[in-house]
Image: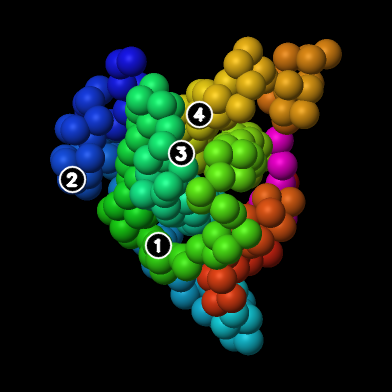
């Protein structure tokens, strides 16, 4: 089975994408931000200061992703951190070691994509003058990494959650360049979701729980709905707070 194509700004290969640092100039060219970089960098600094003054008594057991577009980018970065951490454990698990070659290849490719997404967001936020949230500590104690059903059921939940999260956050993004970027990533996440569903049951790549068949549109979830699920897989001190993100 051939490898899945990897989303990177400048290349189509997994190896190139993982080994090539995302330079500031490359990211700006990719997103088409160009001359807006300086003002965005200043906006990023303002976001950080605004968070400090708006949340002097912020819950230290939570990670506030921030506000505005940088908050949305950090929200996506948090979810990509969670997915990357999950698949890192999957490919090191007893279940993975005993899986078929085809199944291992799919999971290996998905894991590589999630690492690329995670690293891309961190570098992008920094390059634009924002402050990436800290590295989150996952809590996967409810998952049996020796059991195929437990792993794939959780993978399905993460992938469906990721797609609905990007779709739900799209309307909250102010900068159209970020929206373009989100569209490129959510399409990859949707392919992951379909692949995982097919691993669970061949031919079940989509269902009415994720797509409204009357409209043909994927369902979406608000950040508040998404973190209710995501926080169940994060340790105390890493649970997400999205209260300052745009609501509409």
Count the marks: how many? Answer: 4
What residue lies at 35% left-to-right and 35% top-to-bottom?
108
What residue lies at 73% left-to-right and 21% top-to-bottom?
207
Q: Any magenta on residue 105?
A: no
- Mark 1 or 4, closer to the camera: 4
In the rendered structure, which disc, 2 or 4, sits on the residue that comes first in sequence? 2
> For mark 1, what is the residue?
132
User: Does the rendering let one see residue 226?
Assistant: yes
> For mark 2, what is the residue?
21
What residue lies at 59% left-to-right and 79% top-to-bottom?
61
In this picture, residue 121 sits left or right of residue 50: left
Q: Position of residue 99 (x, y in %)?
A: 43, 32
Question: In the picture, residue 221 is in which quadrant?
Answer: top right
Q: Position of residue 97 (x, y in %)?
A: 37, 40
Instruction: Say what secondary structure mark 3 lies in.
Output: helix
Q: Determine which of the numbered discs, if any, sits on residue 178 in the image.
A: 3
Instruction: Say what secondary structure mark 2 lies in.
Output: loop
Of 184 and 158, which appears nearest the observer?
158
In the rendered structure, which disc, 2 or 3, sits on the residue that comes first in sequence? 2
């Amino acid at each position: 089975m051939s490898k899945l194509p990897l989303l990177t700004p400048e290349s189509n290969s997994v190896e190139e994408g993982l080994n090539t640092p995302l330079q500031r100039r490359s990211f700006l060219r990719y997103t088409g931000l160009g001359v807006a970089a300086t003002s965005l960098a200043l906006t990023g600094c303002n976001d950080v200061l605004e968070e400090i003054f708006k949340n002097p008594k912020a819950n230290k057991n939570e990670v506030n992703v921030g506000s505005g577009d940088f908050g949305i980018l950090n929200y996506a970065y948090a979810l990509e951190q969670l997915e990357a951490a999950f698949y890192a454990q999957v490919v090191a698990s007893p279940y993975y070691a005993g899986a078929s070659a085809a199944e291992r290849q799919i999971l290996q490719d998905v894991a590589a994509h999630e690492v690329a997404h995670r690293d891309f967001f961190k570098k992008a936020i920094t390059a634009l003058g924002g402050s990436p949230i800290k590295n989150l500590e996952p809590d996967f104690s409810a998952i049996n990494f020796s059991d195929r059903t437990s792993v794939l059921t959780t993978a399905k939940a993460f992938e469906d959650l990721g797609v609905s999260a990007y779709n739900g956050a799209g309307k909250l993004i102010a900068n159209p360049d970020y929206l373009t970027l989100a569209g490129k990533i959510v399409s990859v996440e949707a392919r992951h979701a379909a692949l995982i569903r097919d691993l669970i049951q061949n031919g079940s790549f989509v269902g009415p729980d994720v797509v409204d068949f009357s409209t043909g549109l994927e369902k979406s979830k608000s950040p508040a709905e998404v973190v209710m699920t995501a926080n169940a897989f994060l340790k105390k001190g890493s649970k997400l707070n999205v209260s300052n993100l745009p609501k509409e």
